[in-house]
């Protein structure tokens, strides 16, 4: 029987992945964890086992894995690209020291691991359009440096110790349940809240900044599909390019305008986040994920926009 630990369970992805896993494998088999609790997360903290866990504390990681007989970890706890630039040392501590704690305890207690990487592994020297799976990865953000280091470390633990570790390079993740926490792609979520609440949005990225996005239902299905894929078919592990929607702020605003005709977007550029966005690909080639384990996202720009407006319309009533 699976016993899955989810770190960072109260973040944007964890908030929806935990209920998804609890539905699939039984609530008692999914241990949600977070460094601290916040209001409005009772569904996660009360809907099955929950642990307060600081992943930078190796002892604490060991004891939670032992206590619950964990055999699989979805290691979501991470700082994102924009907040990382404010405090690179803190990002390194969480993203790298946290990861090595998880890897070491997983090695000693024989767990498989899901590792979320990012498009941030690419940098200004990578091909910009349809960025290939295997290409130059010389990132210039501290977040990207931590993610490419994490990918290499995960592959190393797989090769040296035979640990089953698999990962995805997430582009921007769009969702309605929880806010993203300090990323460069957050505009693609904020825009929906402000469209519904105010009828206008001031974007911190330039109108033609193209970045790939995926919608939460595809994120959930993709992570589990990868973890359940036949290992014999995986030529890559850490980590696969995945994408579903290639969009700019201007195009996303135009799509929203189809539903909210008076919607207006203007721009007040944040130089830090713009520089990060400029260093990332315009679009990704995710054919390796499609070929090796059947990545097949369902939501395009139109479907995602309709669903986001419907879900947020209910939530913000
Ligand atoms: N959404 C992330 C960020 O913007 C990218 O992985 O930091």
Image (cartoon, grey):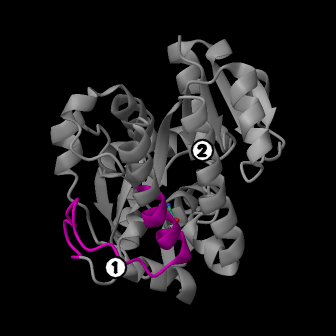
Q: Residue furthest front?
A: 160
* Residue 140, image x, y percentages: 45, 82
Whether residue 34 is visible to the viewer of this picture, yes or no, is no
Q: Is residue 131 magenta?
A: yes
Please indicate whether residue 45 sits to the left or right of residue 199 in the image.
right
* Residue 113, image x, y percentages: 49, 37
Q: Quadrant of residue 92?
A: bottom right
Q: Nearer the viewer, residue 87 or 173?
A: 87
Whether residue 291 is visible to the viewer of this picture, yes or no, is yes
Magenta span of residues: 127-151
Q: Nearer the viewer, residue 59 or 40?
A: 59
Label of residue 95 in the image: none
Q: Residue at x 33, y 83 (%)?
A: 124
Please indicate whether residue 204 sits to the left or right of residue 221 in the image.
right
* Residue 263, image x, y percentages: 49, 65
Count of residue discs: 2
* Residue 22, image x, y percentages: 59, 19
Structural crowding at the residue carrying mark 2, measured as other residues with C-alpha within 10 Å and reported as few (<14), some (14–19) or many (≥20): some
Q: Residue at x 62, y 79 (%)?
A: 85
Q: Secondary structure at mark 1?
A: loop
**Most common SS among magenta residues:** loop
Q: Label 1 to label 2, Cα distance in Å?
A: 43 Å
Label of residue 208 in the image: 1
Structural crowding at the residue carrying mark 1, measured as other residues with C-alpha within 10 Å and reported as few (<14), some (14–19) or many (≥20): few
Residue that carries the numbered disc 2 in the rendered image: 104
Q: Is residue 144 magenta?
A: yes
Q: Is residue 243 above or below residue 251?
A: above
Judge depth for marks 1 and 2 and give the one in front: 2
Earlier in the chain: of badge 1 and badge 2, it is 2
- In the rendered image, the quadrant that contains the C terminus is top right
């Amino acid at each position: 029987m699976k016993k899955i630990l989810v770190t960072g369970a109260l973040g944007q992805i964890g908030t929806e992945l935990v209920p998804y896993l609890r539905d699939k494998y039984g609530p008692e088999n999914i241990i949600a964890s977070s460094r601290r609790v916040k209001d409005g997360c009772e569904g996660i903290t009360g809907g099955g086992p929950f642990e307060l866990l600081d992943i930078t504390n190796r002892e604490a990681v060991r004891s939670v894995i032992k206590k619950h007989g964990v055999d699989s970890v979805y290691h979501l706890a991470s700082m994102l690209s924009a907040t990382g630039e404010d405090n690179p040392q803190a990002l390194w501590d969480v993203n790298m020291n946290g990861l090595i704690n998880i890897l070491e305890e997983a090695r000693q207690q024989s767990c498989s691991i899901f590792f979320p990487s990012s498009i941030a592994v690419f940098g200004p020297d990578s091909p910009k359009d349809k960025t290939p799976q295997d290409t130059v990865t010389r990132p210039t953000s501290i977040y990207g440096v931590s993610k490419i280091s994490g990918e290499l470390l995960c592959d190393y633990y797989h090769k040296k110790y035979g640990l089953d570790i698999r990962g995805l390079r997430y582009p921007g993740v769009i969702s309605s349940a929880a806010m993203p926490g300090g990323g460069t792609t957050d505009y693609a979520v904020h825009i929906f809240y402000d469209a519904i609440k105010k009828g206008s949005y001031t974007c911190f990225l330039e109108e033609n900044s193209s970045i790939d996005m995926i919608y939460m239902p595809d994120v959930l299905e993709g992570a589990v599909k990868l973890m359940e894929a036949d290992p014999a078919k995986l030529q890559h592990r850490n980590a696969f390019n995945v994408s579903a929607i290639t969009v700019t702020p201007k195009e996303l605003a135009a799509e929203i305008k189809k539903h909210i005709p008076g919607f207006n977007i203007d721009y007040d550029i944040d130089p830090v986040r713009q520089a990060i966005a400029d260093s990332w690909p315009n679009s990704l080639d995710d054919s390796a994920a499609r070929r090796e384990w059947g990545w097949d996202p369902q939501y395009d720009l139109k479907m995602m926009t309709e669903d986001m407006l419907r879900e947020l319309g209910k939530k913000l009533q």
